[in-house]
Image (tube, helix red, strand yellow):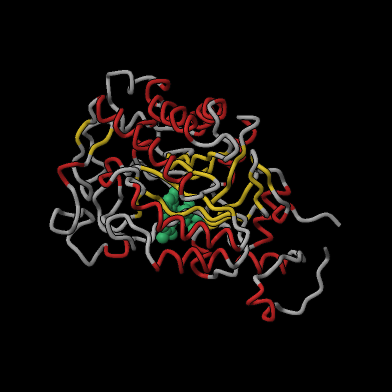
Amino acid sequence: TTLPKLFQPLKIRNTTFKNRLWVSPMCMYSAEDGFANDFHLAHYGQLAMRGPGAIIMEATAVLPEGRITPNCLGIWKDDQIAGLKRIVDFEHQFGTTAGIQIGHAGRKASTIPLSQYGKRPSLRASGEEGGWPENVYGPSAIPFDDQHWEPKEMTLEQIENVQQAFVDAAVRADKAGFDFIEIHGAHGYLISSFNSPLSNHRTDKYGGSFENRTRFAVETVQRMRKVWPAEKPLFIRLSTSELVEGGWAPKDTVALAKILHQEGVDLVDCSSGGNDVRQKISAGPGYQVPFATEVKNGAPGVLAGAVGIILDGEQANDILEQGKADAILIGREFLRDPTFVQKASQKLGVFVKWNDQYERGRPKTHYLV
Ligand code: FNR
């Protein structure tokens, strides 16, 4: 018998992922001044012990004002490297490939954690709550909705500074030992809002045509690739569709994926939405998988990650076996059950190594392979 695709290793550049079942980035809103702490070590550490091929650390900001909330992780100063490295080193002890999602929240910055929503008057984080209302910016002065701050239109100098911050963050991520970076280009945050004609009304070279709107993303990738080691993979998460008439659509994602692949992006993590309140989502099991398939087929050579309501190992494996995607990312199921990978391996009859400390807890089953 051959190994089910989900548990086949995947080599990208010089990095080997031990399987194709990965932890999707999830904000934990538990940092102070952007620093990783014991919570992050315990959280990512417990997941690493349970066998995922990769863990993508939550959205981590390249600048303080690029945080979604005052409690988001940061990678904007060298002092933040040590706390991240401690987690990476721990993850490596258990054979997990360590990734980090780096990003900038753009016009969706300076909010309160969603878990607090409803307990406070609005989603906005004020100055007293640790927010930075006066320093929220995006491609254009168009707010996301009335729950978010009014952003300022970025100057060319600000665009240059933010791109440089992505480059500096990549250097720090390398120093922290991360094996790969995922750029956050989804969900209406800065890069995503540049791409969309609905949120980007600029009239300079960063707005208007597809080429101009995607210039921010393309230049950022080009600049990061110069400092990010050639043997290490670079991913990007994109909102493949913003699910609004006249907005960013899957065909745009395919076109951008081709360009970014040329510039050194290895995998597109295919999410959707988050840039426009008019979006029409009908979420159900595997609802975003067709987007990944469209990218995989439309932009040959680039790998496609599937994410969104993938709930068990068989569903995950079928997606790969049917050639619909190259890797599977799981979010909430890992919060419900950190043993997801071990359960999936049992179900699929695959023997995976458990950490020595827990080995005696392994259920007694017969393995096919
Ligand atoms: C998320 N998601 C998310 N996405 C992202 O690109 N960066 C992030 O930091 C976060 N943060 C985050 C926090 C929490 C608590 C949740 C539940 C989700 C989205 C996540 O990565 C994933 O794409 C979605 O949750 C859909 O996958 P699941 O959860 O259905 O497997």
Query: Which residue lies at the image location 66% right of the left edge and 57% below the top edge?
Result: 315
Q: Please indicate whether residue 190 sits to the left or right of residue 153 in the image.
A: right
Q: Nearer the viewer, residue 108 or 280?
A: 108
Q: Position of residue 89 (x, y in %)?
A: 52, 59
Q: Which of 100 and 306 is in front in this view?
A: 100
Image quarter where the N terminus lies is bottom right
Residue 366 appears in the figure: yes
Q: Locate ligand 1 by image quadrant.
A: bottom left
Q: Nearer the viewer, residue 237 or 96?
A: 96
Image: 214 above or below 101: above
Q: Position of residue 6 (x, y in %)?
A: 69, 54
Q: Please indicate whether residue 174 sits to the left or right of residue 67 in the image.
A: right
Task: In the displayed orientation, state which residue is furthest to the left.
Answer: 128
Query: Which residue lies at the image location 76% right of the left edge and 66% below the top edge?
Result: 351
Image: 11 above or below 163: below
Q: Where is residue 162 in the image (x, y as percent from the top left)?
A: 31, 34
Query: Which residue lies at the image location 61% right of the left edge and 34% below the top edge?
Result: 302
Query: Which residue lies at the image location 52% right of the left edge and 53% below the top edge?
Result: 308
Image quarter where the C terminus lies is bottom right
Residue 279 appears in the figure: no
Q: Which of 194 and 9 is in front in this view?
A: 9
Q: Position of residue 238 (x, y in %)?
A: 47, 39
In this rendering, the count of numbered labels is 0
Image: 6 above or below 295: below
